[in-house]
Image (cartoon, rainbow, N blue to C red):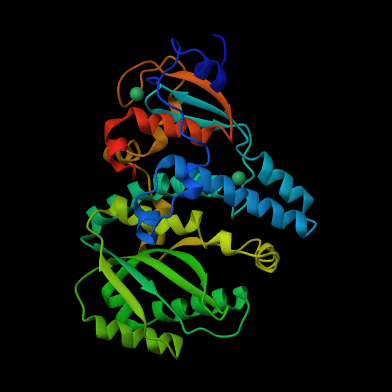
Amino acid sequence: MTQLTLSTVLSNPNHSPVKSQSKPSAHTYVHKRVTKSQIENKRTRSQRARERLATKGHLTRLAVGLGEVELADKIDRCHSRLSVLTCGRHIARIIPNFTCEFRLCPDCGRRRSRRLQSKYLPMMRSFMLHNKVTPVHLVLTQTHRAETRKQSIGRIKDAFTRLQRRVFWNEYFKGGTWSLEFTKDKNGLHHTHLHIIGFRRKFFDIELLRGEWLAATGDSHVLHLKPILDIATGLQEVVKYVSKPLDIRRFGAADLREFLGLKNMRMFGTFGEFREFCKDFEPSDNDASAVGELESLSRDLVEGCACPQCDAPLFDLRMSKNELPQFYEQIEASSPDRVRKRAH
Ligand SMILES: [Zn+2]
Ligand SMILES: [Zn+2]
Protein backbone atom coordinates (compact mmCIF):
# COMPACT_ATOMS: atom_id res chain seq x y z
CA MET A 1 0.00 0.00 0.00
CA THR A 2 1.29 3.47 -0.85
CA GLN A 3 2.41 5.59 2.03
CA LEU A 4 0.30 8.64 2.80
CA THR A 5 1.79 11.81 4.10
CA LEU A 6 -0.02 14.58 5.90
CA SER A 7 0.54 16.97 3.01
CA THR A 8 -1.03 14.63 0.40
CA VAL A 9 -4.08 14.23 2.58
CA LEU A 10 -4.32 17.95 3.20
CA SER A 11 -3.88 18.88 -0.46
CA ASN A 12 -6.47 16.40 -1.74
CA PRO A 13 -9.90 17.15 -0.29
CA ASN A 14 -11.37 13.93 -1.74
CA HIS A 15 -8.85 11.93 0.12
CA SER A 16 -9.10 14.04 3.22
CA PRO A 17 -9.98 11.87 6.19
CA VAL A 18 -11.54 14.84 7.91
CA LYS A 19 -14.29 17.18 6.79
CA SER A 20 -12.89 20.19 4.99
CA GLN A 21 -12.57 23.18 7.22
CA SER A 22 -10.53 26.29 7.65
CA LYS A 23 -7.10 25.45 8.91
CA PRO A 24 -6.45 26.90 12.36
CA SER A 25 -3.32 28.94 12.59
CA ALA A 26 -0.41 27.00 13.95
CA HIS A 27 0.19 29.75 16.46
CA THR A 28 -3.32 30.36 17.73
CA TYR A 29 -2.65 28.92 21.15
CA VAL A 30 0.29 31.19 21.80
CA HIS A 31 -1.93 34.25 21.80
CA LYS A 32 -4.63 32.75 23.95
CA ARG A 33 -4.43 33.74 27.57
CA VAL A 34 -5.55 30.85 29.70
CA THR A 35 -5.97 30.49 33.43
CA LYS A 36 -4.13 27.87 35.41
CA SER A 37 -7.18 25.66 35.83
CA GLN A 38 -7.82 25.83 32.10
CA ILE A 39 -4.27 24.77 31.52
CA GLU A 40 -4.74 21.86 33.91
CA ASN A 41 -8.12 20.67 32.73
CA LYS A 42 -9.11 22.08 29.40
CA ARG A 43 -6.08 21.76 27.24
CA THR A 44 -6.84 20.02 24.02
CA ARG A 45 -4.62 17.31 22.66
CA SER A 46 -3.27 19.72 20.05
CA GLN A 47 -2.30 22.18 22.76
CA ARG A 48 -0.62 19.48 24.77
CA ALA A 49 1.24 18.29 21.67
CA ARG A 50 2.47 21.86 21.10
CA GLU A 51 3.55 22.12 24.72
CA ARG A 52 5.54 18.92 24.38
CA LEU A 53 7.26 20.35 21.31
CA ALA A 54 8.06 23.58 23.18
CA THR A 55 9.37 21.63 26.19
CA LYS A 56 11.59 19.51 23.99
CA GLY A 57 12.88 22.61 22.19
CA HIS A 58 13.70 24.14 25.57
CA LEU A 59 15.45 20.97 26.77
CA THR A 60 17.44 20.71 23.53
CA ARG A 61 18.65 24.31 23.86
CA LEU A 62 19.62 23.77 27.51
CA ALA A 63 21.51 20.59 26.60
CA VAL A 64 23.37 22.37 23.79
CA GLY A 65 24.23 25.16 26.22
CA LEU A 66 25.77 22.61 28.59
CA GLY A 67 27.74 21.02 25.76
CA GLU A 68 25.60 17.85 25.99
CA VAL A 69 25.42 17.61 22.21
CA GLU A 70 24.61 13.92 22.08
CA LEU A 71 21.68 14.34 24.47
CA ALA A 72 20.43 17.37 22.53
CA ASP A 73 20.53 15.36 19.31
CA LYS A 74 18.67 12.44 20.86
CA ILE A 75 15.89 14.67 22.21
CA ASP A 76 15.66 16.39 18.85
CA ARG A 77 15.35 13.10 16.95
CA CYS A 78 12.89 11.58 19.46
CA HIS A 79 9.40 11.35 17.92
CA SER A 80 10.56 13.57 15.03
CA ARG A 81 8.96 11.34 12.36
CA LEU A 82 5.69 9.65 13.16
CA SER A 83 3.60 6.92 11.70
CA VAL A 84 0.04 7.72 12.77
CA LEU A 85 -2.55 4.99 12.49
CA THR A 86 -5.83 6.79 12.03
CA CYS A 87 -9.32 6.44 10.61
CA GLY A 88 -9.28 10.19 9.98
CA ARG A 89 -11.44 10.99 12.98
CA HIS A 90 -9.57 9.12 15.70
CA ILE A 91 -5.96 8.25 16.30
CA ALA A 92 -5.55 4.60 17.16
CA ARG A 93 -1.81 4.47 17.50
CA ILE A 94 1.28 6.61 16.98
CA ILE A 95 4.57 4.90 16.19
CA PRO A 96 7.63 7.15 16.50
CA ASN A 97 10.80 6.70 14.46
CA PHE A 98 12.97 6.93 17.56
CA THR A 99 12.59 7.36 21.32
CA CYS A 100 15.31 9.08 23.35
CA GLU A 101 14.22 7.60 26.72
CA PHE A 102 15.55 10.70 28.46
CA ARG A 103 13.74 11.05 31.76
CA LEU A 104 12.60 14.60 31.20
CA CYS A 105 11.43 14.03 27.62
CA PRO A 106 7.67 14.60 27.65
CA ASP A 107 7.02 12.15 24.80
CA CYS A 108 9.04 9.37 26.41
CA GLY A 109 7.52 10.25 29.79
CA ARG A 110 4.03 9.67 28.41
CA ARG A 111 5.08 6.29 27.08
CA ARG A 112 6.68 5.42 30.40
CA SER A 113 3.62 6.39 32.40
CA ARG A 114 1.36 4.35 30.07
CA ARG A 115 3.65 1.37 30.48
CA LEU A 116 3.48 1.71 34.26
CA GLN A 117 -0.30 1.88 34.12
CA SER A 118 -0.55 -1.21 31.93
CA LYS A 119 1.78 -3.07 34.24
CA TYR A 120 0.41 -2.07 37.63
CA LEU A 121 -3.31 -1.66 37.12
CA PRO A 122 -4.05 -5.42 36.83
CA MET A 123 -1.85 -6.09 39.87
CA MET A 124 -3.59 -3.40 41.90
CA ARG A 125 -7.04 -4.70 41.01
CA SER A 126 -6.05 -8.23 41.87
CA PHE A 127 -4.36 -7.17 45.12
CA MET A 128 -7.46 -5.26 46.21
CA LEU A 129 -9.68 -8.20 45.37
CA HIS A 130 -7.57 -10.66 47.36
CA ASN A 131 -6.84 -8.46 50.37
CA LYS A 132 -9.93 -6.44 51.25
CA VAL A 133 -8.03 -3.16 51.23
CA THR A 134 -9.11 0.24 49.96
CA PRO A 135 -6.74 2.55 48.08
CA VAL A 136 -5.94 6.06 49.24
CA HIS A 137 -3.78 8.77 47.68
CA LEU A 138 -1.38 10.10 50.25
CA VAL A 139 0.92 13.06 49.60
CA LEU A 140 3.85 13.33 51.99
CA THR A 141 5.76 16.60 52.15
CA GLN A 142 8.81 17.82 54.01
CA THR A 143 10.16 21.15 55.19
CA HIS A 144 12.18 23.21 52.71
CA ARG A 145 15.89 23.38 53.32
CA ALA A 146 18.91 24.71 51.49
CA GLU A 147 20.08 21.46 49.92
CA THR A 148 20.61 19.84 46.53
CA ARG A 149 17.85 18.01 44.70
CA LYS A 150 19.60 14.75 45.47
CA GLN A 151 19.72 15.53 49.20
CA SER A 152 16.08 16.57 49.16
CA ILE A 153 15.08 13.30 47.50
CA GLY A 154 17.25 11.23 49.83
CA ARG A 155 15.78 12.96 52.86
CA ILE A 156 12.14 12.27 51.97
CA LYS A 157 12.83 8.69 50.91
CA ASP A 158 14.66 7.99 54.18
CA ALA A 159 11.76 9.46 56.14
CA PHE A 160 9.35 7.23 54.23
CA THR A 161 11.50 4.18 55.04
CA ARG A 162 11.32 5.13 58.73
CA LEU A 163 7.56 5.58 58.47
CA GLN A 164 7.20 2.08 57.03
CA ARG A 165 9.04 0.60 59.99
CA ARG A 166 6.55 2.01 62.44
CA VAL A 167 3.91 -0.18 64.09
CA PHE A 168 1.12 2.23 63.16
CA TRP A 169 1.96 2.10 59.46
CA ASN A 170 1.92 -1.69 59.35
CA GLU A 171 -1.28 -1.86 61.28
CA TYR A 172 -3.10 0.36 58.82
CA PHE A 173 -1.34 -0.08 55.48
CA LYS A 174 -0.67 -3.15 53.41
CA GLY A 175 1.81 -1.65 50.95
CA GLY A 176 1.35 0.31 47.75
CA THR A 177 3.30 2.43 45.29
CA TRP A 178 5.24 5.67 45.56
CA SER A 179 6.32 8.27 43.04
CA LEU A 180 8.32 11.46 43.33
CA GLU A 181 7.35 14.97 42.40
CA PHE A 182 9.81 17.87 42.47
CA THR A 183 9.11 21.55 42.65
CA LYS A 184 10.96 24.60 43.85
CA ASP A 185 9.55 27.26 46.12
CA LYS A 186 9.71 31.01 45.60
CA ASN A 187 13.16 31.12 47.17
CA GLY A 188 14.52 28.43 44.86
CA LEU A 189 14.56 25.74 47.55
CA HIS A 190 13.81 22.22 46.44
CA HIS A 191 10.44 20.92 47.40
CA THR A 192 10.03 17.18 47.02
CA HIS A 193 6.77 15.30 47.48
CA LEU A 194 6.04 11.62 47.69
CA HIS A 195 2.79 10.53 46.11
CA ILE A 196 1.72 7.26 47.64
CA ILE A 197 -1.04 4.94 46.64
CA GLY A 198 -1.53 3.19 49.95
CA PHE A 199 -3.71 0.10 50.38
CA ARG A 200 -5.47 0.81 53.63
CA ARG A 201 -6.56 -2.06 55.84
CA LYS A 202 -8.96 0.06 57.92
CA PHE A 203 -9.87 3.62 58.78
CA PHE A 204 -7.74 5.73 61.10
CA ASP A 205 -7.68 9.25 62.44
CA ILE A 206 -5.59 11.41 60.11
CA GLU A 207 -4.11 13.22 63.12
CA LEU A 208 -2.49 9.95 64.13
CA LEU A 209 -0.89 9.68 60.70
CA ARG A 210 0.35 13.29 60.93
CA GLY A 211 1.98 12.44 64.23
CA GLU A 212 3.63 9.39 62.70
CA TRP A 213 4.97 11.41 59.77
CA LEU A 214 6.30 14.01 62.19
CA ALA A 215 8.08 11.24 64.08
CA ALA A 216 9.56 9.92 60.83
CA THR A 217 10.71 13.30 59.46
CA GLY A 218 11.54 15.03 62.72
CA ASP A 219 10.04 18.30 61.52
CA SER A 220 7.10 17.84 59.16
CA HIS A 221 3.56 16.77 59.80
CA VAL A 222 2.21 18.10 56.51
CA LEU A 223 0.43 15.52 54.40
CA HIS A 224 -2.73 15.15 52.35
CA LEU A 225 -4.93 12.11 52.19
CA LYS A 226 -7.82 11.42 49.89
CA PRO A 227 -9.71 8.24 49.06
CA ILE A 228 -9.29 6.79 45.59
CA LEU A 229 -12.71 5.96 44.19
CA ASP A 230 -11.48 4.49 40.93
CA ILE A 231 -8.09 2.79 40.98
CA ALA A 232 -7.44 3.37 37.25
CA THR A 233 -7.85 7.14 37.71
CA GLY A 234 -5.89 7.09 40.96
CA LEU A 235 -2.99 5.29 39.32
CA GLN A 236 -3.08 7.62 36.33
CA GLU A 237 -2.83 10.56 38.70
CA VAL A 238 0.29 9.34 40.48
CA VAL A 239 2.13 8.10 37.39
CA LYS A 240 1.73 11.49 35.73
CA TYR A 241 4.58 12.67 37.97
CA VAL A 242 6.75 10.01 36.38
CA SER A 243 6.17 11.61 33.01
CA LYS A 244 6.21 15.15 34.35
CA PRO A 245 8.22 15.33 37.55
CA LEU A 246 8.53 19.10 37.36
CA ASP A 247 7.75 22.18 35.34
CA ILE A 248 10.48 22.04 32.73
CA ARG A 249 9.71 25.41 31.23
CA ARG A 250 10.93 26.98 34.48
CA PHE A 251 14.00 24.80 34.32
CA GLY A 252 17.41 26.38 33.74
CA ALA A 253 20.81 25.07 32.68
CA ALA A 254 21.90 24.52 36.29
CA ASP A 255 18.76 22.46 36.94
CA LEU A 256 19.47 20.28 33.93
CA ARG A 257 23.06 19.74 34.99
CA GLU A 258 21.88 18.74 38.46
CA PHE A 259 19.29 16.42 37.00
CA LEU A 260 21.86 14.72 34.77
CA GLY A 261 23.77 13.90 37.94
CA LEU A 262 20.82 11.87 39.23
CA LYS A 263 21.15 9.27 36.49
CA ASN A 264 19.95 6.09 38.11
CA MET A 265 17.48 7.51 40.53
CA ARG A 266 14.14 5.76 40.67
CA MET A 267 11.03 7.88 40.47
CA PHE A 268 8.42 5.18 40.97
CA GLY A 269 8.35 2.04 43.07
CA THR A 270 6.32 -0.39 45.13
CA PHE A 271 6.53 -1.13 48.84
CA GLY A 272 5.29 -3.47 51.54
CA GLU A 273 3.10 -6.47 50.85
CA PHE A 274 2.08 -5.05 47.50
CA ARG A 275 5.73 -5.20 46.44
CA GLU A 276 5.88 -8.90 47.31
CA PHE A 277 2.57 -9.49 45.56
CA CYS A 278 3.89 -7.90 42.34
CA LYS A 279 6.91 -10.22 42.31
CA ASP A 280 4.71 -13.33 42.21
CA PHE A 281 1.87 -11.93 40.16
CA GLU A 282 0.64 -14.03 37.28
CA PRO A 283 -2.41 -12.54 35.62
CA SER A 284 -5.51 -14.68 35.49
CA ASP A 285 -7.89 -14.30 32.54
CA ASN A 286 -9.84 -11.71 34.49
CA ASP A 287 -6.81 -9.69 35.45
CA ALA A 288 -5.48 -9.74 31.90
CA SER A 289 -8.66 -8.17 30.60
CA ALA A 290 -7.94 -5.10 32.72
CA VAL A 291 -4.88 -4.42 30.61
CA GLY A 292 -7.09 -4.19 27.54
CA GLU A 293 -8.57 -0.97 28.82
CA LEU A 294 -5.26 0.69 28.31
CA GLU A 295 -3.24 0.99 25.19
CA SER A 296 -2.05 -2.62 25.11
CA LEU A 297 -4.93 -3.41 22.78
CA SER A 298 -3.72 -0.87 20.27
CA ARG A 299 -0.33 -2.56 20.07
CA ASP A 300 -1.78 -5.16 17.71
CA LEU A 301 -3.41 -2.64 15.41
CA VAL A 302 -2.05 -2.28 11.88
CA GLU A 303 -3.15 -0.56 8.70
CA GLY A 304 -6.49 -1.94 7.49
CA CYS A 305 -7.71 -2.89 10.97
CA ALA A 306 -10.98 -1.39 12.17
CA CYS A 307 -10.72 1.76 14.27
CA PRO A 308 -11.47 0.73 17.89
CA GLN A 309 -13.73 3.78 18.28
CA CYS A 310 -15.74 3.82 15.03
CA ASP A 311 -14.88 0.66 13.04
CA ALA A 312 -13.74 2.65 10.00
CA PRO A 313 -10.56 1.26 8.42
CA LEU A 314 -7.28 2.59 9.73
CA PHE A 315 -4.61 3.96 7.46
CA ASP A 316 -1.03 4.90 8.10
CA LEU A 317 -0.31 8.61 7.88
CA ARG A 318 3.33 9.72 7.94
CA MET A 319 4.09 13.10 9.43
CA SER A 320 6.76 15.12 11.18
CA LYS A 321 6.55 16.13 14.83
CA ASN A 322 5.66 19.66 13.78
CA GLU A 323 2.63 18.44 11.84
CA LEU A 324 1.13 16.41 14.68
CA PRO A 325 -0.46 19.34 16.60
CA GLN A 326 -2.15 20.47 13.40
CA PHE A 327 -3.48 16.98 12.79
CA TYR A 328 -4.86 16.87 16.35
CA GLU A 329 -6.56 20.19 15.66
CA GLN A 330 -8.33 18.78 12.62
CA ILE A 331 -9.48 15.79 14.59
CA GLU A 332 -10.71 18.02 17.41
CA ALA A 333 -12.58 20.21 14.94
CA SER A 334 -14.25 17.21 13.28
CA SER A 335 -15.50 15.78 16.54
CA PRO A 336 -18.58 17.56 18.02
CA ASP A 337 -17.72 17.09 21.69
CA ARG A 338 -14.24 18.43 21.08
CA VAL A 339 -15.71 21.52 19.44
CA ARG A 340 -17.75 22.23 22.54
CA LYS A 341 -14.71 21.92 24.74
CA ARG A 342 -12.68 24.37 22.71
CA ALA A 343 -12.60 27.83 24.21
CA HIS A 344 -13.89 30.45 21.82
ZN1 LIG B 1 12.08 11.15 24.09
ZN1 LIG C 1 -12.36 6.03 14.22
Place of residue 266 in the rendered image (x, y in percent of width and height, measured from the top left): 55, 62
Residue at position x 34%, y 53% in the image = 41
Query: On the image, which quarter does residue 202 sit in?
Result: bottom left
The correct choice, above or below, for 336 with respect to 101 in the image is above
The correct choice, above or below, for 205 with respect to 304 in the image is below
Asked whether, in this view, residue 290 is left or right of residue 300, the answer is: left
The correct choice, above or below, for 231 with respect to 44 in the image is below
Q: In which quadrant is the N terminus drawn? A: top right
User: Which quadrant of the frame does ligand 1 lie within?
Assistant: top right
Place of residue 133 in the rendered image (x, y in percent of width and height, measured from the top left): 23, 63
Asked whether, in this view, residue 139 is left or right of residue 227, the answer is: right
- Residue nearest the viewer, comparing 165 with 323: 323
Residue at position x 59%, y 55% in the image = 104
Q: In which quadrant is the C terminus drawn? A: top left
Q: How many labels sit on residues? A: 0
Place of residue 79 in the rendered image (x, y in percent of width and height, measured from the top left): 60, 37
Place of residue 187 in the rendered image (x, y in percent of width and height, measured from the top left): 56, 81
Asked whether, in this view, residue 177 is left or right of residue 77, the answer is: left
- Residue nearest the viewer, comparing 39 with 101: 39
- Residue nearest the viewer, comparing 173 with 90: 90
